[in-house]
Image (cartoon, grey):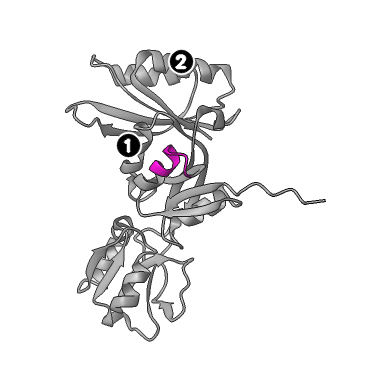
Amino acid sequence: MSQMQSAPAEKVAYLGPEGSYSMLAAQKLCPQAQGVPCKSFFSAVEKLRKGEVGSAVLPVENTLQGAVTQNLDLLYAAPSLFAVREYVLPIEHRLIAREGTRLEEVRRVYSHPQAILQCGKFLSGVLSRAATIETSSTAESLTHIREAGDAGIVGSHVRAAGFCFLGENIADEKKNFTHFLLVKKGREHLPASSSHVYFAATCPHEPGALLKMLQILSVYDLNMTKIESRPIKNSPGTYCFFIEFKGDVADRHVCAALDRLEEYTDGFKLIGCY
């Protein structure tokens, strides 16, 4: 008797290459899925929209740098995509270089712009003579230092033969976390219950519009945990607000609040529940 063939593993897209923080988050959120590293967040979202992968992992906030605005815009612009799970990843930045390299020999540092910003004090102080060069991810810096022989900022999880860490965590703040969301296509993937709800909307052009929107949450006794504003493209003076609050999507008060929010606001978009 022939054995039944196992179903192909689900694919999850994330910002690559191998060893990136997004890859680590993807492994935590989808441990059984086949990873698909992408060159950009836009590419990861496009693969999900086109059905080439079953999910995508996107960072939406860092405790030091705030919102990852590019990904907020991508989620708002994709009506069929929804966040269904979250993961908060501790971030630790360390300097990696070829074995035998001394700190004073470093003349160039490669890393993702966010990582460079998060290590600003160290780079402007201890490595003030070194040039900083932006790459698409912290892990990509390994490619550059293999070729150039200089140093790169990477996570403590990265291991590469012939390279070593120069010292400990060099981030400005040692308690640094990034909030990742697992995104899927279709409302049917939304969980039946949740601890948080995330939505985006623009307010009507009237006095006290933002206050009126937030009062809807207050009326239903819902605790807001996050709020960000983003300008609407091609509409100067118009802003979209991204708001997260504590709530179970199965609760009738939460459902009533969402209905009221959609009724009152313009361009309402449920980002997700998790």
The tally of labels here is: 2
Q: Is residue 105 above or below residue 10?
A: below
Q: Residue lying farthest right?
A: 1
Q: Residue drawn 35% across and 70% down?
A: 143
Q: Residue lying farthest left?
A: 236
The crowding category of the residue bearing disc 1, from other C-alpha atoms within 10 Å (few below 14, some 14 to 19, many at least 20), is some
147 displayed left or right of 61 = left
Q: Label 2's element? A: helix
Q: Position of residue 37 (x, y in %)?
A: 44, 55
Q: Label 1's element? A: helix
Q: Residue drawn 59% across and 23% down?
A: 250
User: Which region is colored magenta?
Assistant: 45-52
The crowding category of the residue bearing disc 2, from other C-alpha atoms within 10 Å (few below 14, some 14 to 19, many at least 20), is few
- Magenta stretch encompasses residue 51: yes
Q: Quadrant of residue 77?
A: top left
Q: Is residue 20 visible?
A: yes
- Magenta stretch encompasses residue 6: no
Marks 1/2: CA distance?
Answer: 23 Å
Task: Say which of 163 and 50 sits in front.
Answer: 50
Task: Indicate which label's residue lies in the foreground, 1 or 2.
Answer: 1
Q: Quadrant of residue 125?
A: bottom left
Q: Amino acid at mark 2?
A: Asp
Q: Position of residue 31 (x, y in %)?
A: 59, 52
Q: Which mark is residue 259?
A: 2
Q: Residue drawn 36% across and 64% down?
A: 140
Q: Position of residue 35 (x, y in %)?
A: 51, 54
Q: Quadrant of residue 165?
A: bottom left
Q: Which residue is mark 1?
A: 73
Q: Is residue 177 visible?
A: no
